[in-house]
Image (tube, grey):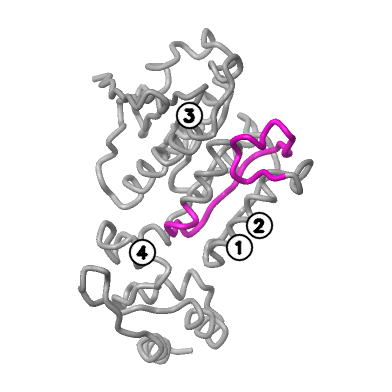
Amino acid sequence: MSSNRLTHLLKSLAGDLTRPDGHPYTSLSFSAECRIAGETGQSLREVEILALEQNIIPERYCRNQTSLSNEDQKKLLQAHVAIVGLGGLGGTVTEILARIGVGRLTLIDGDCFDESNLNRQLLSNPGNLGKAKAEIAAERVKTINPAIQTYPAETFFNSENGRELLHSVDLVVDCLDTIPDRFTVESTCQTLSLPLVSAAIGGSCGQATAVLPGDPGLKLIYGIPRKAPAKGVEATIGTLPFAAIYMAAVECAETVAILIGRSPGLQNRLFLADIMEHTSELVDFS
């Protein structure tokens, strides 16, 4: 189908609506997206990108505006993010990034759900016990935003498979619970010149940082990799669900900022929060 015909189809199926503040915008419904995809052979993600190029906002993203512009939304749909670890942090990161419209998600975890996950891991439920986290994460994304393309990897990230898993992504979100594995992910990101957003949780507390290519990174937090402890405080004090969801949201905010070209607020900084006490602190390493 010609681009002129596709543009005509988009404009003919779009409609004029108003935001809660009364400002008008041009909207494309999900049913219209599906019709266009069916008639043109384009994917839903491609239809949404083409709509945004015509200043038509897919209705599912209308409440992202005006915090995000049409150009910002297009950048998100064109982006490819890898989420390493799909537990308490990673499950919520997956949910948020799919809902906000990050177009491609590589979902990496070799683990399966067990009963101890039920208190905090968004993707877990009694019916999913024993099932692969990567598989369930991909299924969840498909149910909430079919335009998002997923690439589930039922494997544990390591120095041997890391470059292959991350070779096509734009950014990596670290949602792991072991410190040596965090350093492995960071090392691979530095080799591939990829930005990394990292968080950790324990009890009612959490921390988050952003590491860009060339930054000193995680050693500012944990020290020299070979001397860092294998586990964080989570292994001793457990993790409360609101801590996992809170810090996942922090990771997603930093991820979106980097993807749309804003200056990352947590580069060479460590955000610390105790959600139970409603306190936070920003440590500036520079």
The earlier-in-sequence mark between 3 and 1 is 1
| Along the viewing direction, whichever of 78 and 55 lies nearer the viewer | 55
* Corner quadrant of residue 17: bottom left
- Of circles 3 and 1, the one toward us is 1
Mark identifier at residue 143: 1
Give the mark nearest the N terminus, 4 or 2: 4
Kindly identify which residue carries mark 2: 139
Q: State which region is magenta.
A: 97-125
How far across and down, in percent of the image, does residue 81 sit?
48, 48
Quickly name the residue at label 3: 186
User: Where is 233 relative to 40, above or below?
Assistant: above
Element under label 4?
A: helix
Location of residue 271 (image quadrant): top left
- Locate residue 21 relative to residue 82 in the image: left or right: left
Identify residue type, mark 4.
Lys
Give the residue number, with chain letter if any, for mark 4: 74
